[in-house]
Image (tube, rainbow, N blue to C red):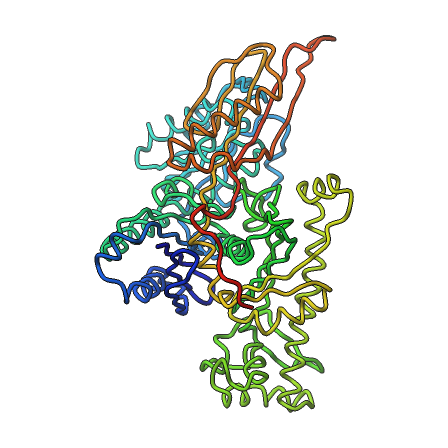
Amino acid sequence: MLIGIDVGGTFTDGILCSEGRIINSSKHPTKKDDLQDSIFAVLDDLLQDLTNYEIKSNITQVVLSTTLVTNLLVTGGGERAALVLIPGPGLNIRQMEFFPHTYITEGATDFRGRNTEPLNEAQIEEIGKLIVAEGIGKVAVVGKFSQRNDSHERRVEEILKGRYPQLEVIRGFEVSGQLNFLRRAATTYYTAVTRDKWASFAASIKKSIRERGITSPINILKADGGTMPLNVSLDCPCETIFSGPAASVIGALALTMDRYTSVVVDIGGTTTDLALILEGKPLYASRGAVVGGRYTHVRSFAVRSIALGGDSAVRWVGNKIVIGPDRLGPAACFGGPGATPTDAINILEEGKLGSLSLSRKALEEVSRQAGLTVRGLAQTIVSRVNDQLKDSIKEMFKSWEQEPAYKIWEIIHKRQVKLERVVGIGAAAGAFIPSLADSLGCQALVHHYSPVANALGAAVARPTLTLLLHADTEQRSYYLNLEGISGRISSGFQLEDAKELARKQLKIIAKKRGIGRYADRYEYFLEEQFNMIRGWSTVGKLFDVGVQITSGIIDEFKGVQMHS
């Protein structure tokens, strides 16, 4: 049996699943100031009909999708941290708006990993003095090209901790092995800000799950739609951002299990998330997840959230009906303070969702101002929501069309991508998706598991693993971004050799981490070759190859019975 729990902005959903059948499900309001309580309320609901023996012997996996790290970064609720940058030449960092308490020090490493300028150690000691004087206990240290030579970052840590042993230092080369200095800096800083609170959360989750007799592995859903063990997440909490949208994409895959091209529309209480499945494969964001307006090295799906949901406030402003972007609370039919799209649906469906009288009372105030009947206003609200969703999808396609995977698909197939289906996720999907799909000229899919599809996605997501290989034929060496692995290569080493070496190493590491059965579900997402010229001759080549176990569904899940 599998357990999946998704902590959304409005509700926390959970499912207990066995052989494609949901045995039990639960939904509780999310307590933003106490996510653990929301999770355990759902977990206890799921377990209530099981004996202690069934819990211990039959539950094989628990997967959580949580908003904790996203909330910390969006609200500024993480730990205070300083950022020490070693940019070297070429970037005018001082003219950029970075994070508070950002310090720039002298020193440089070139693109081949050679230290071309020594560190100014006296400057680093002075920076440490300033950081401690600010009462800051965490420092993110990031050097340009540190993923090819980490000695400058290591030395900065030695100096800082030698003088101020109480400081905790997070080094950029350990957080990301990818090129792009600014993204690595942002990802390292976010890791420093969130790591302690994530560790405390993870410890509490593990303790409480074990107290309930569950001894199975505990995994966390990542932004790329894959899972990772809870203990692995302690070193990379940023990988968990946007796990909610990832859960909706994997949930849509679990409901469909086919090769249609679909837009996933996850209508929550506060926001709606949009994503694209291209012939059965989710579309990735090639430049990484964006947090606070900054690109990171967190690999994620190409997802957009819009400020429109089932609980968006409905008002009469000036001479028109305005929906959102804010949420004042739950829908009026559930005791909330005002009219919402959920109340409009409740009117049209004769009270199937909640109190019909409360919905009518909330809508009457707006309907009088709009000169409409309550039912006419409800129809207008639903129509307006669909219009906004339609416009957002069309706008999002312009963004998706810029993604390399999208362009490559069109080149290979010699035709444009054609939308075939809209997959609805969330409790409100049934009210909006059919007419939305009709306006887009495609099929609609609203499954009877759509209200808990995010939790289903978390439960059945398979593990992912990303590996980066850098090779230098002049130095006859290569290294990986994982586990400090390096080795020797021949001078005749070529791009195909680099790809094969990366694939073999991926297989070895996957087996070591207990996910070897998925090592053949790989794809290359990076293939770069750079010729090094001296005089008029090529003296060597640099290769960068990225390979990953792609997101998808675990082998033991065979799909759910369709019922739309």
Image-based side of 464 in relation to 415, left or right = left
- Residue nearest the observer in this picture, 235 or 6: 6
- Residue nearest the observer in this picture, 339 or 87: 339
Image-based side of 111 in relation to 39, left or right = right
Q: Position of residue 100 (x, y in %)?
A: 50, 45
Q: Position of residue 539 (x, y in %)?
A: 65, 10
- Residue nearest the observer in this picture, 554 or 363: 554
- The residue under the point 61% across, 11% down is 492
- The residue under the point 62% across, 89% down is 374
Q: Position of residue 8 (x, y in %)?
A: 46, 62
Image-based side of 387 in relation to 550, left or right = right
**Looking at the picture, does residue 233 appear above or below residue 529?**
below
The quarter of the rendered structure image containing the C terminus is bottom right
- The residue under the point 30% across, 64% down is 44
| Number of numbered callouts drawn | 0
- Residue nearest the observer in this picture, 385 or 465: 465
Quarter holding residue 133: top left
**Looking at the picture, does residue 496 appear above or below residue 181?**
above
Q: Position of residue 462 (x, y in %)?
A: 45, 45
**Looking at the picture, does residue 140 appear above or below residue 489?**
below
Quarter holding residue 11: bottom left
Quarter holding residue 483: top left
Image-based side of 251 in relation to 5, left or right = right
The quarter of the rendered structure image containing the N terminus is bottom left
